[in-house]
Structure formats: C-alpha cells, structure tokens
Image: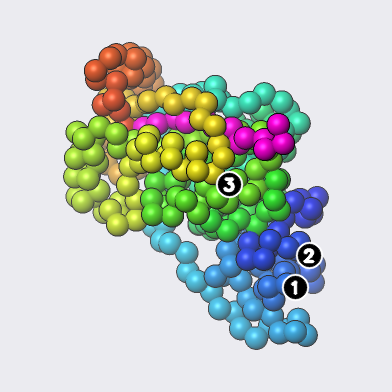
Amino acid sequence: MDEKLLPILACPVTHTPLRFDQSRSELISDSAGLGYRMIDGIPDLVPGRARKLQSSGETVSQKERLEESHAYAKSYHEARRTVPGTVVYEEYWNRRLIDLLPNGRNLRALDLMCGEGIFLPVLAQLYDEVIGMDLSMEMLKLVEPERRSRIFAGDAMRTPFAPASFDVVVVRGGLHHLPDRLSEVFLEVRRIMRPGGRLVFLEPCDDNWMIRVFRRFVYRTSAHFDEDEERGLTTRELRGHLEKNGFHLLRVERSGFLGYALLLNTDMHGFLRTINSLPWSRVMAKVLIVFDSLWEKTPVIRSLTFNLFLSAQLKDENQ
C-alpha cells in the first residue's frame, strides 16, 4: 500500500483517520477498535472482515465474513482481457466512458467497484492520482501488480475514505449488484466526493419491457446470475437517486443491442467464446459496434438497448 494515501483514508465505520501498524501490516482504527488486514498487499477495509482489538491493542478474535463467491472471477477476467471480440467491445465501452469524464490531470479519481481493475489503466492515462476499490478480494487479486499499491477492498456503502476526497468517481457496472441499497451507495458517493465532482457510471438498463423480459429469462436460466441480488436499473430510478443526493444529471446515453449480446457474455457461453476467438472476430466486433451505434440513434427502437451511460455533477452548495 502507498502510505501517501493515508490522509484520504478513513475508517468505514467511524469515518475517523486510520494509522498504519507496520509490525502487523494492518491499518488500525483506534476509534472503532478494529484492525484492517493486508492481503497480498491489498488493504481489506470491509468492516465485517476486520479483527477486533482490546483496549490494549491485542487481538481478541479474528472474526471474518467470507466475501461473496466469485467462482468465475478468473474466467471473467480472462474473457475481458484475452478474447479478441470481447476486448474490442470493452475498448469501445471505455471510449464511451472517457467521453463523459472531465479533463484535468490533477484530478483525483476513484474506480468504485473496480472488479479486476480493467478500467484502472484507462483512468491512469487521464489522471495523476487513481485509486480502485472493490468488495471482492478475489477480483482485486487479479489487478495488475504494479497498481496494487493504490487499491483497497471495501464496501461501496461504507467506503474507507475521508469526506470530499475525490473529484471523479466511476462505476463501471457495479450498481446493479446492489439494487435495494442504491440510496446508501449514492449517499456514500456524495460523502466522499468534492463539490463540483463528476460521477460517471455504466449499468444494465431495464427501461424497455422486452429487455426486462429477456434479462429475467437469462437470470433465471444461467448459474452465473442471482436474480435476488442483481437486476437491471431504470433511468427513472437512477435519476431519482441522483437528484435526491444533490447531483445534477449531465448526460444519459443508451448503449448495446446485438453487439453487446454477442460480444460481452463470452465468459458464460462457450459458443460465444468460440466465435469471438476466430481470426475474423475483431472485424466482426467492429461491424457490430457500428450496428449498435446506429441502433442507439434510431427513434422508436432506441429504447431497446441493454445498457445506460450516465454522467452527473455534484452541486456546489456554496455557489
């Protein structure tokens, strides 16, 4: 861990400063009586996995909460890094996100729910200070080694950061895993974001009834999804959470139809992985991206898309 980050870290329970205990390789919250361990050099700042301290500072227990299973973490990571057609579509998504981000190398950016860190290198090209956070330690272990000094395991509803720490927060497909806790996530994002900061996110869209029916069918028939813990989100509910927490919605863009369906699910369907690994798969992916781009701009059918890009700015109450 980069110890220069200590000034912006805070206990996710009490929001008070942390100190680094080098002898134990732990971040200590004296106010909460908790010690947050380092796992493979990654600080695990999820409260339920912290160890409790006695007043003397000694361990009384090592009570851990096992994180949600990511049985397919490695296949998920591999598909998005190595399958040619999928890589092309991921790069297309990245360009769409970049278009929504503010300029300024001196801005501090957080990739919230960063997973295996696929967007971290992109952010590092735009900003001098980039930090990643995810609940899953299994996913974080897949982050490129050179970036691990600036990533943390943490809960999006109780992040380990001090108030007003970030100018930019990006969520690249994580909110739909917390559909019933969105109000808590947006409230926390507001807490850690500086006034005037930019929030940019990409999420599955459930605006169209046909998309909702199709998505529910996939969720119920695939072992890779849990219908009780994730679902597509609507523009209306996301807009409501943003407005409630003091954000001004800047842009809403729809994305993904045939190209998304054929190129972005290669970790779950063997036949999709096969066709996306063929010699001509990169050309096929580019053609499908053009098709999706035209689909998104066509009246009447444009609502029939699988994803949403949104950009919002936190209002400055002093202005």
Where disc 2 sits, the SS reads strand
Q: Which residue is mark 3?
A: 189
Q: Are marks 1 and 2 in contact (CB under 8 Å)?
A: yes
Is residue 309 on the magenta stretch? yes
Asked if residue 283 shows in the view, the reply is no
Q: Earlier in the sequence, mark 2 or mark 3?
A: 2
Q: Provide residue 44's location: percent of width, then percent of height.
A: 61, 62
Where disc 3 sits, the SS reads helix
Q: Quadrant of residue 64?
A: bottom right
Q: Earlier in the sequence, mark 1 or mark 2?
A: 2
In-front residue for pair 217/73: 217
Label 1 to label 2: alpha-carbon separation: 8 Å
Query: Residue at point 30% right, 44% down?
Result: 268
Query: Residue at point 44% right, 30% down?
Result: 309
The three-letter code of the residue at mark 2 reads Arg
Q: Which mark is residue 30?
A: 1
Query: Residue at point 30% right, 57% down?
Result: 228
The three-letter code of the residue at mark 3 reads Val
